Image: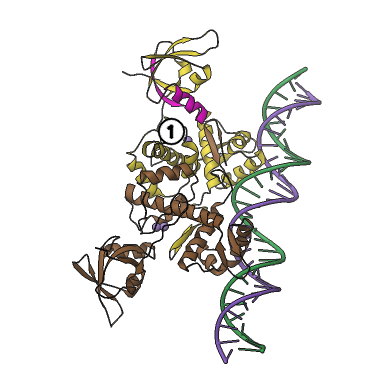
Chain colours: A yellow, B brown, C purple, D green
Amino acid sequence: MLLAIGYFSYYRLSTVDNQLITSFTEENYLKIIYLLTERHNGNEVSTNQLAEHTQTKAASVSDMLRKLAEKNYINYRKYQGVTLTEAGEQIALGVIRKHRLWEVFLVEKLGFGWDEIHDIAEQLEHIDSKELTKRLDDFLENPKFDPHGDPIPDAKGKMPSVSYQKLSEIPLNQSVVMMGVSVHSPAFLQHLDKQQITLGCDLKVLEISDFDKSYGLLLNNKIRLFVSNEVARNLLVQVSNA
Amino acid sequence: MLLAIGYFSYYRLSTVDNQLITSFTEENYLKIIYLLTERHNGNEVSTNQLAEHTQTKAASVSDMLRKLAEKNYINYRKYQGVTLTEAGEQIALGVIRKHRLWEVFLVEKLGFGWDEIHDIAEQLEHIDSKELTKRLDDFLENPKFDPHGDPIPDAKGKMPSVSYQKLSEIPLNQSVVMMGVSVHSPAFLQHLDKQQITLGCDLKVLEISDFDKSYGLLLNNKIRLFVSNEVARNLLVQVSNA
DNA sequence: ATATATTTTTAGATTAGTCTAAAATTTTGT
DNA sequence: ACAAAATTTTAGACTAATCTAAAAATATAT
Ligand SMILES: [Mn+2]
Ligand SMILES: [Mn+2]
Ligand SMILES: [Mn+2]
Ligand SMILES: [Mn+2]
């Protein structure tokens, strides 16, 4: 809620663009439920998983789930985990859209590295203004992917479907393009930077070491390097269609 | 507090760049105390004034003042009103800096009108990242004034001093430049837009009507128009030094 | 199948920020 | 100078989001 008096105005949390009030906290729960559901291919998300990802205790999550179910944002059968309703999913996708658009802004316009942006986007994703989101999207020239390769839901709340594979699942000598990462930690992203593994680069698995299961790669048809098995499992790629 | 786990992270309010925790709400109080103190030329701000500008009740303000005084952000003698301490002023100036930088962004980069930006900046001013503020400032080419003509405090927390006069205090036939507005309501700003009164335009008071005390102006040495006494009192100008 | 372990929910508290109503203090007007 | 009015503070209560501890439900393991 916003009210102007003379010079000033005071922004009182539990904002609204127009209609229903969804708190900062509720938005975070819905977003995390969406992302975890997606990661589990549509399976219910458990209370403990949510506690872990919200950095709270299971008891707090139970309370919040009761509340979100009351508002019809989630399907909730006690002890059975949750999924989002259509209404809940739309809120989640709106938050994810803003998060990813702001990440594009931070990298493309402000020159941040892809390892520095997530925590800032975590705040910006809650800014509540349809018009701002629309103008930001245009300013960025309607990007379809964020700096980590994640697809950006459109203004209607539709998430583009992507079909990436883990590099670890690609046959030897198959040329692929690096499309995304499934871990966003600064440490992992900086590790990739050091080896010049960036979004859009060409990769080919030449060998998998018998010694430590590490991956011997050819990068951009030029550079040979080894990455650990864990790195290979967290690189998302697509078979080159060239 | 921010913690990343795999894909996600969860932003828990009561944020920090590094050190002390200042809530969203506390930031708003400190900002409003700063602006009201400035408006009263350094005089104490009263509980009722704060209640009005925070859209809360005097009782709530009293509580918050006790808390802010405890944290040494304000000088508070019961019943006597408050002023900011150096620490409180630095927080207020940081918030105001971000508010005004974001307003520049919204107008210069996203093409918003000056009447549409305040409420969005009211949210953006709480985003907590020194690095973001620094890069935003550079991206905007280190603007010294926001779209309403208000000066932008520098990164060290120093507010540039400006010496504007109300148009209503300017002698007849004195050429002045329009430098700012002392009311930021969309209605007022749109009213100015309609008469093409913009920041930087030339103004000269040709007459003050005996009938209704309205001001007969010459705009940009070309256009003659009348504005109400209230408009004249809320236009901030500076004598042309050309 | 049943005891044990794990997960989830409930019960009861706590904190921040707000409220209304009542008490205390300051200001104003004669 | 003092009564009345206005302002400010205090007291007590409420809501959202969290917590710990205990109870209930579900899963697992012999
Ligand atoms: Mn992110
Ligand atoms: Mn991302
Ligand atoms: Mn503003
Ligand atoms: Mn402004």
Q: Nearer the viewer, residue A99 or A16?
A: A99
Percent position of residue B93, x then y:
48, 55
Report the side of A60 relative to B228 (left or right). Answer: right
Identified at 51% across, 34% down, the residue is A35
Indicate whether residue A191 is drawn in magenta.
yes
Q: From where the camera sits, is residue B216 visible?
A: yes
User: Given the current orientation, which residue lies at the most extreme front position?
Assistant: B241
Task: Mark 1: give few (<14), some (14-19) or many (20+) Cα within 10 Å.
Answer: some
Q: Amino acid at mark 1?
A: Gly
- Check the picture and name the quadrant holding the C terminus of chain B: bottom left
Quarter occupied by residue B12: top right
Image location of residue B151, percent across then percent down: 39, 57
Of residues B80 and A15, which is closer to you in this image?
A: B80
Chain ID for label 1?
Answer: A
Q: Nearer the viewer, residue D28 or B96?
A: B96
- B134 w.r.t. B70: above or below: above
Q: How many marks?
A: 1
Q: Is residue A163 above or below residue B199?
A: above
Residue B181: % across, % down: 36, 64
Q: Quadrant of the N terminus of chain B?
A: top right
Tell me: is circle 1 under 8 Å from ligand 2. Answer: no
The residue that mark 1 highlights is A113
User: Which residue is located at x 34 percent, y 74 percent?
Assistant: B169
Q: Nearer the viewer, residue A91 or A176?
A: A176
Residue B121 in the magenta stretch? The answer is no
The answer, for residue A3, to whether it is visible in the render is no
Q: Residue furthest left?
A: B222
**Image quadrant, ligand 3:** bottom left
Q: Secondary structure at mark 1?
A: loop
The residue sitting at 43% across, 44% down in the picture is B134
Highlighted magenta segment, given as a residue range: A175-199
